[in-house]
Every structure is written in structure tokens, then in C-alpha cells.
Image (cartoon, rainbow, N blue to C red):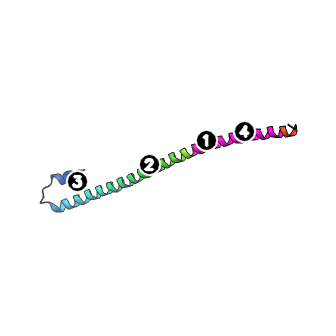
Amino acid sequence: MSAMIQLVNQSPGQSPMLEGVEERAADFYSTETKLEQRLNGALAYISLLQTRICNLQEQLSHTERELVCKEALLRNMTVREQELRRQIAHGW
């Protein structure tokens, strides 16, 4: 921060000192930009994963509902089969 204050307070005739300060400032902002880019990339990836999780949860919920329906159908078919077997055994 003091380097940036020196940069503002110095006159244009002091170029050797300015070049060093400018390079350090450029490095600082370059590092910050790289970090921001990495963070933005990570946030985008997190968002993608959250979307995938939501989609998988929806698919799981749909599959669970289908399973409950098929189990009910299977129970009904088993009961119906038992009724038919009783009817056949008693000769109707």
C-alpha cells in the first residue's frame, strides 16, 4: 500500500523508482486477477455440481415414486393370483 502511495506522490522525473513500484503493482494485480479467475472457476464448478445434484435428486424422487407404484401393482397382482388359485381349487 505504501508503494502505491509513493507512486502517486512521486513526480514524473523519478522513473527508476517508478518502474519498480509499477512492476510490483502489476504483479499484485496480476496475482489478484489469477486468484479471482480461479475463484470464479471454482464457483462455476460448484454451481454446476449443485445443478447436477438437483437433477439427480429429481430423478431419484421420480424413480422412488415409480418403485412405490410398481410395488403396489405387484402386491395387487399377488393377491389376485391367490384369489384365482383359491377359485380354481374350489372348482368355482
Label 4 – label 1 distance at C-alpha: 17 Å
Q: Secondary structure at mark 1?
A: helix
At 76% across and 41% down in the image, what residue appears?
78
Q: Is residue 50 left or right of residue 28?
A: right
Label 3 – label 2 distance at C-alpha: 38 Å
> Is residue 70 found inside the magenta-colored segment of the image?
yes
Residue named by callout 4? 76
Q: Amino acid at mark 4?
A: Asn
Residue in front for this viewpoint, 57 or 4: 57
Residue named by callout 3? 3
Of circles 4 and 3, which is in front?
4
Q: Secondary structure at mark 3?
A: helix
Residue named by callout 1? 65
Quarter of the image with the C terminus in it? top right
Q: x and y percent of residue 13 in the render? A: 12, 60
Evaluate if marks 4 and 3 touch, with contact meaning CB atoms under 8 Å apart: no
Q: Amino acid at mark 2?
A: Ser
Q: Earlier in the sequence, mark 4 or mark 2?
A: 2
Q: Amino acid at mark 1?
A: Arg
Q: Which mark is residue 34?
A: none
Q: Is residue 72 left or right of residue 18?
A: right
Of circles 4 and 1, which is in front?
4
Dot 3 alpha-carbon crowd within 10 angstroms: few under 14, some 14 to 19, many 20 or more: some
At 60% across and 45% down in the image, what residue appears?
63
Residue in front for this viewpoint, 44 or 36: 44
What residue range appears in magenta?
Answer: 60-86
Q: Quadrant of residue 67?
A: top right
Q: Earlier in the sequence, mark 4 or mark 1?
A: 1
Q: Secondary structure at mark 2?
A: helix
Residue named by callout 2? 47
